[in-house]
Image: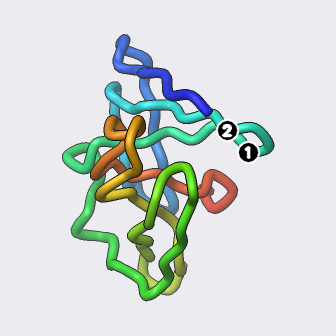
Amino acid sequence: MRTTGSGNGSKSGFSTASLIADSTNTLELREHGYPPRHYFPREDVRMELLSVSETTTFCSFKGHTVTFSLGERQDIAWSYEQPIGGLEAIADRVAFYEELSE
């Protein structure tokens, strides 16, 4: 697992019918067996469109998640508010399931 910053001016975004997140300051997390995920700073995410869902998960490497929904689309994003040691850089950032983007 590793994180790489994309704050070098390259742009990342996530959208459904409307743009939900747009940033030049994402962190990319790569884990064996999973696609790379971009973690967006919350200030670059339209958090007012997301609601906290009841779903929670736990990763032994990263900790407990807070999961977000968008209207009827459940669990489209997640965040680690207090990640386990070594991954503090992703704290309070939001990642999206890319397979849900349109």
The residue indicated by pointer 2 is: 31
Q: Does dot 2 land on a helix, a strand or a loop?
A: loop
Location of residue 7 with respect to 3 vertically, above or below:
above
Q: What residue is shown at x 48% (from left), y 78% (from top)?
A: 56
**Colour pattern:** rainbow
Residue positioned most to the right: 33
Q: What residue is shown at x 30% (from left), y 58% (from top)?
A: 81
What's the distance in space between the residues labelled 2 and 1, CA to CA?
A: 6 Å
Mark 2 vs 1: CB contact within 8 A:
yes
The residue indicated by pointer 1 is: 34
Residue 86, how many percent across, how many down?
Answer: 41, 35
Instruction: Name the amino acid, label 1.
Output: Tyr
Q: What residue is shown at x 19% (from left), y 46% (from top)?
A: 43
Q: Does dot 1 land on a helix, a strand or a loop?
A: loop
In the displayed structure, does residue 71 sit left or right of residue 30? Answer: left
In the displayed structure, does residue 84 sit left or right of residue 46? Answer: right
